[in-house]
Image (spheres, grey):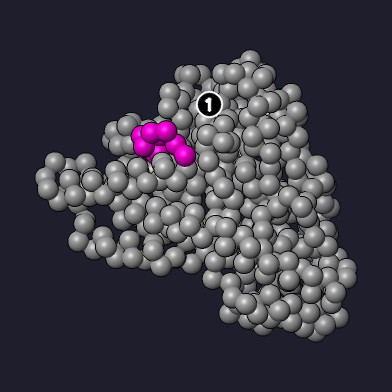
Amino acid sequence: MLYLDHAATTPLRPSAWAALESFRHTFGNPSGVHEISRSAKNALEAARERAAGLLGAARSDEIVFTAGGTEADNLAVAGAALAGGSPGDVVVSAVEHKAVLESAAFIGRLGGRVDIVPVDGRGLIDPGAVADAVGPDTAVVSTMLANNETGALQSVGAIVEAVREKNSATLVHTDAVQAFISEPVDVVALGVDLLSLAAHKFGGPKGVGLLYVRDGVRLEPVLHGGSQERGRRAGTHNPMGVAGMVAAMEETVADRTSFRARVGGYRDTFERLLAAAVPEAEVNGPPDRRLVQHAHLGFPGRSSETLLIRFDQAGLAAAAGSACQSGAVEVSHVLAAMGFDEAAAAAAIRFSFGWTTQPGDAELAVKIVTGVLEDLA
């Protein structure tokens, strides 16, 4: 099977496997006081130090370990909005991940105001429009660094500046889950107060992530129980998962320049050959401002559901621009926000390349896609 669905999840990196294996005998609960627990605690804190350094954080205690990107997004958005007691207002873009949009909707149900900033036809956010939505009671703004469907890269630094000029007390969160594998992610350079990552998107294990929380930022916990993570995230720590995540972070950062050149080349070859063979195929999103590993294409007049089934049968794994929920095909909220009608959204396919993609895979993918299209003609 040719796997071009790395944006959904990507295989474990060798370093992550090795880190997980090394924890076979380090099974202690880091909250305990005996030697076995201390060993797990020391490993956990060493990983926290490494994670902070990789993100440019000033302090290791600015890193909060979570059970994944969804939890990190919930803690950032809901935790920031509720930190003052009564719900503060929230500003998000229309193309955010559902974890952010649903967290904002939750705050709305509690009485906070939620403003959703539109995007243009390329899926890009106007920093000025974000600032216009910020008011005196806006607790947090959340805009992603890169879109998980189209790969569109947002101007987070400019958004931070615009928000700061409007209301210096408003926190800014960015979901960097999809971007970390190929884009430089430095919390100081970005200027954000909060930043989310999910390990499985860059070669770490599933079920673990982190939230960067700038020193001095207050969050209301969304999980209630023990006082782990300095009272910000209750629940027994996962030292093994954290070790696998941080090992994958280190390998990702070390490989990033090569990844961009190598994987970007595969993506460009795929799009070039496909454009020659299937001229009607269209790139969705900004061609010059997107992740190097994403190829989000529209096939006018086709059904993404049918194409994905046929691709799978032919040995190619990809993803659709729409989601199947409760037996019905639902238009992607990202494509809808970009102005796509139902037919256009239902004809969209995301091909996403990754660290395991090999020379020749792009050519093979084009052969499979064109073969399926010819069979369906």
Looking at the image, is 364 positioned above or below residue 154? below
Residue 260: tell me if it is visible: yes
Which residue is located at x 52 percent, y 34 percent?
A: 188
Q: Quadrant of the C terminus?
A: bottom right
Q: Which residues are magenta?
A: 56-64
Residue 236 image point, x, y percent: 29, 45
Which residue is located at x 39 percent, y 52 percent?
A: 246
For badge 1, the amino acid type reads Ala
Residue 115 image point, x, y percent: 69, 29
Which residue is located at x 83 percent, y 59 percent?
A: 343
Residue 40 image point, x, y percent: 22, 50
Which residue does the numbered mark 1 point to in the structure image? 81
Q: Nearer the viewer, residue 329 or 371?
A: 371
Q: Check residue 57 for magenta coloring.
A: yes
Looking at the image, is 336 positioned above or below residue 325? above
Residue 49 image point, x, y percent: 35, 42
Q: Is residue 124 left or right of residue 90?
A: right
Residue located farthest toward the left when viewing the structure as drawn: 34
